[in-house]
Amino acid sequence: MPDNLLEIQENVPLAPLTTLGVGGAARFFVRATSEDQVAAGVKYARENGLQIFVLGGGSNILVSDRGFGGLVISVELSGVEIVNDSESNVELNVAAGEDWDAFVDFCVRSGYHGVECLSGIPGLVGGTPIQNVGAYGQEVSSTIDSLRAYDRQTDQIVELSNGDCGFAYRTSIFNTTVRNRYIVLSVRFTLSKAGRPTITYRDLKEYFSGREPTLDEVRRAVLSIRRTKSMVIDETDPNSRSAGSFFKNPIVDRAVYERIAAEFADAPYFEVDASHVKIPAAWLIARAGFAKGTVLGNAGISANHTLAIINRGNASATDIINLKNAVEAGVQEKFGIDLSPEPIFVGFNNANAKN
């Protein structure tokens, strides 16, 4: 690869590249608009002894106040290609740098079923398999056929099937067993051209009151519901200055839930299997004393959604972490349940930024 393939920038502020808007600078930074540039970025980091962080849309990360001392690779590959179009299904190959909600909008307008309930989620296509993004009764893993990725261990581009990705609730191999090994380059989706929109989530059922909506109506409903919760990025809404849902809904033994329900008759849950249920983290947080609008320094709980920790203006990463730790401690003390954060912590000493 030619030495001039990359334009390495230094001391690039990362806060403006995230939806939370906090954190320090990247010591080195490169925009990768091709697969060759991704590979060259990895090579540059290796030759210079630098850690790598792969930046997508910045919607699910918290950058430390000291920033990141290695190389940030901003993956900006673009393109949407229809690779197979049959009477019942369509297969699309989508570059990792494509805007996720723009892709959902394209699918809905084209009559492709499977991602309509994932409208309004900020970020890029390449980030969706990592967390197995899900909302309102859908998960992205149900539509992913395979993906193309750069393997940092072998310096090869590989194709991973859906089964290879190890998808589970908000997880995959990319954020668990082989974290930091693969850089997603593109994702292949298989979507249905027939069937009905997914209306399984309570908010959507109530919104449509039993009638069967169109795909476009579902998308507009999801966007409307998300806006009421400040879960759509809006520069005029200070409550949307967040990383989205900050905590995962914990999956617990049924006996744990029954103990809680004995004390709180309104304790909600979702069935997981015969032995486990999922308890909404928002309910646990509120019952632990952290109501909507709670303030701690320059960080706060969104006035519209208990799951969102927001930057109230001029917040530091330390402010966000202090509130995160207080919420976790409160839920643990009240219910004996450990909350797991959803965002990726960049430039901290440990994965969950306890320090």
Image (spheres, grey):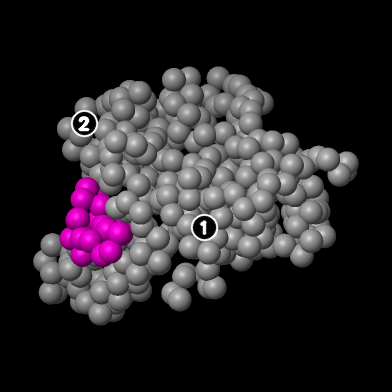
How many residues crowd around disc 2 within 10 Å: few (fewer than 14), some, or many (20 or more)? some
Residue 222 is drawn in which quadrant? top left
Q: What element carries label 1?
A: loop
Q: What stretch is highlighted in magenta?
A: 290-309
249 lies above or below 332: above
Furthest-right residue in this view: 2
Q: Can residue 316 be seen in this view?
A: yes
Tag of residue 208: 2
The residue under label 1 is 24
Q: Earlier in the sequence, mark 2 or mark 1?
A: 1
Residues at circles 2 and 1 in contact by the CB criterion of under 8 Å: no
* Residue 274: percent from left, percent from top: 34, 66
**Dividing the image into 4 quarters, which one contains the C terminus?**
bottom left
- In x, y percent, where is residue 67? 55, 60
Task: Tell me the tag on residue 38.
Answer: none
Location of residue 172 with respect to 159 vertically, above or below: below
Q: Main secondary structure of the magenta part?
A: loop
The residue drawn where x is 25% and y is 44% is 229
Give the percent coordinates (x, y) of residue 346. 54, 61
Label 1 amino acid?
Gly
Magenta stretch holds residue 202: no
- Identify residue type, mark 2: Phe
Q: What is the CA distance from the residue labelled 2 to the residue labelled 1?
A: 44 Å
The answer to whether residue 277 shows anywhere in this view is: no
- Residue 353 image position (x, y, % from top left): 46, 70
Q: Give the residue drawn at x 63%, y 45%.
A: 74
Q: Is residue 249 left or right of residue 58?
A: left
